[in-house]
Image: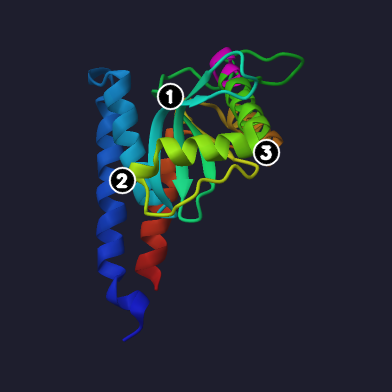
């Protein structure tokens, strides 16, 4: 029996459970505080992206020996490379403007501000370089495999925020333009995008 067939039912159940969990959270989002919401989403992301073996919260970054920055979440993959993740609660209007500016919908302040924030985090991580790798490896060595080294090699940023279910087709098109603008360093995902990816994964497995 092909190995992929052995785990097919498990994979469907896994994605279906995550889908139902995320859908339930979105329906009941008012009853979540920020900390609980972020914790639940981190668990979901680790299941969806198994390449990550560890995640650390409120990670100190001191690239200029003057001011310490604090990253919300630092994800570490199996090779020790790190990525930066920002998780925002899914407020109804947090992505694109309702009105047009010069015939285009533009990012709302929360989205543009989060993009700027994560770009700065990546900038400071890259500046920190070898010093940062040594600091982070030492700081988190008890939570990582033995002789495991952390590497800062052009980290990628992930932003999880907002809903698309209340956007018009034109707003969604302009949002796609915004996402593609930053695609080389930042992957911007809405919660509806996460649900869509889960649905596609479930459907694709069932077609095998």
Q: Check disc 1 and report its element: helix, strand or loop.
A: loop
Label 1 neighbour load within 10 Å: few <14, some 14-19, many 20+: many
Give the CA distance from mark 3 to mark 1: 20 Å
Viewer-closest of 38 and 196: 38
> Does any portion of residue 193 appear in the rendered image?
no
Dots 2, 1 in contact, CB < 8 A: no
Q: Which residues are magenta?
A: 108-113
Residue drawn at x 36%, y 58% is: 202
Quarter-wise, where is residue 97 in the image?
top right
Judging by the rendered image, the residue that carries numbered circle 1 is 88
Viewer-closest of 67 and 184: 67
Numbered disc in front, either 3 or 1: 1
Mark 1 or mark 2, which is nearer the start of the sequence?
Answer: 2
Dots 3, 2 in contact, CB < 8 A: no
Numbered disc in front, either 2 or 1: 1
Residue 19 is labelled as: 2
Q: Check disc 2 and report its element: helix, strand or loop.
A: helix
Q: Position of residue 103 (x, y in %)?
A: 74, 18
Viewer-closest of 120 and 3: 120
Residue 167 is labelled as: none
Asked if residue 179 is among those painted magenta in the image, a careful observer would answer no
Give the CA distance from mark 2 to mark 1: 18 Å
Q: Check disc 3 and report its element: helix, strand or loop.
A: helix
Q: Position of residue 74 (x, y in %)?
A: 46, 35
Residue 180 is labelled as: 3
Mark 1 or mark 3, which is nearer the start of the sequence?
Answer: 1
Mark 2 or mark 3, which is nearer the start of the sequence?
Answer: 2
């Amino acid at each position: 029996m092909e190995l992929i067939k052995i785990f097919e039912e498990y994979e469907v159940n896994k994605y279906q459970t995550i889908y139902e969990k995320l859908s339930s959270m979105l329906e009941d989002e008012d009853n979540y505080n920020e900390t609980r919401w972020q914790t639940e989403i981190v668990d979901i992301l680790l299941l969806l992206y198994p390449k990550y073996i560890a995640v650390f919260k409120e990670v100190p970054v001191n690239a200029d020996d003057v001011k310490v920055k604090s990253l919300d979440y630092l994800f570490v993959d199996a090779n020790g490379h790190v990525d930066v993740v920002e998780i925002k609660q899914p407020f109804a209007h947090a992505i694109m403007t309702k009105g047009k500016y010069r015939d285009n919908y533009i990012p709302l302040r929360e989205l543009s501000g989060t993009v700027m924030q994560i770009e700065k985090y990546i900038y400071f991580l890259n500046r920190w370089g070898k010093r940062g790798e040594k600091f982070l490896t030492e700081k988190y060595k008890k939570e990582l495999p033995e002789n495991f080294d952390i590497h800062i090699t052009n980290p990628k940023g992930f932003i999880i925020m907002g809903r698309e279910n209340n956007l018009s087709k034109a707003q969604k098109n302009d949002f796609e333009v915004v996402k593609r603008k930053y695609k080389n360093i930042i992957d911007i995902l809405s919660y509806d995008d996460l649900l869509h990816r889960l649905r596609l994964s479930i459907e694709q497995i069932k077609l095998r």
